[in-house]
Amino acid sequence: MAHQTSRSCRPMSWAGLLVSLAAFSSAAAGAEPRKEIVNTFDRGRESWQIYDYNGGIANGGNVFFLPTWEKTGGVENSGYIWGDDSRWRIDTPEDPHSILAFILYHHWITLDEMEPGRTTPRPTVSLPEGRLDMRDAEVSVRLRGDGLDLKGAKCYFWVMGGSARWHYTARPLNIAQGTWGPEERFVLPNDEAQWHMSWPPGGGRLDDTLKTSHSCGFSFVGFSEEVTGKFSMDQFRVRLKPR
């Protein structure tokens, strides 16, 4: 797809970011460890974003867009979020090339709890306070496609932590067309034979990634050209295993 020149990311304020991160670190220091992530999307986007890789500019750096939030139309007419090919872009350094259609940095959750109603994308800053142990975590989600052309790709859940991103390739996810598919539920095994590391070359072990995860999301991998159409998500949940 030829990307429109209007595709852009609103500039972030580094001064505002530093203030937010300082407040986040202070609040996180006294907080109870997070036991789960629950996104019903009944009140908004709930910290999720869409990854555009570089905004179409060489060495352009990370570019993010907010997904669209719909108050109704989700599972049982609940709220839900969606993105499309006007906001994602092929991440060419990934091997194989990937599209990170939905992405969630764990510390965004706490920042949005402190600052609800934010209308601009947040940058990526990996903080120790935002890391979660996702070894053997149980994930569930409802997915939907409308006019979604995967171009031969499969949809996977991915986790990034330590120094690597791993896609859970042993469990491709089903995306129903024009309707909400049944719940996808799976456990994240600490077994590299069931995963693929896409970035960086020579990156770290799966155990380190899951144990110190700072972000996760849904990817398209294996396409012949950029995936097009509308991709929607509802009722996302991660139940962390007690340690």
Image (tube, rainbow, N blue to C red):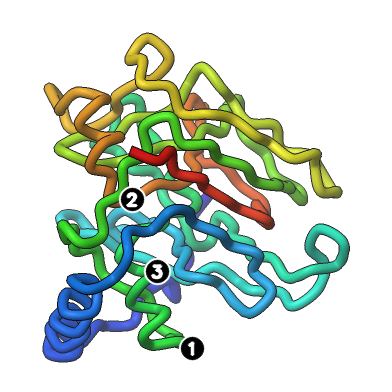
Percent x, y for residue 183? 74, 40
Q: Earlier in the sequence, mark 1 or mark 2?
A: 1
Give amino acid for label 2.
Answer: Ser
Secondary element at image label 3:
helix
Image side of residue 99 versus residue 54, left or right: right
Q: Are marks 2 and 3 in contact (CB under 8 Å)?
A: no
Secondary element at image label 1:
loop
Q: Circle 2 is placed at which residue position?
A: 215
Q: Circle 3 is placed at which residue position?
A: 109
Marker disc for residue 117: 1
**Front-most of 221 and 27?**
27
Tell me if mark 2 has few (under 14), some (14-19) or many (20+) residues whose alpha carbon lies within 10 angstroms of its own. many
Q: CA distance from mark 1 to mark 3?
A: 12 Å
**Front-most of 206 and 14?**
206
Residue shown at the point (16%, 74%) measured from the top left: 25
Q: Earlier in the sequence, mark 1 or mark 3?
A: 3
Residue shown at the point (51%, 17%) measured from the top left: 170
**Front-most of 130 and 152?**
130
Q: CA distance from mark 2 to mark 3?
A: 11 Å
Say if residue 60 shows up in the picture: no
Give amino acid for label 3.
Answer: Ile
Q: CA distance from mark 1 to mark 2?
A: 21 Å
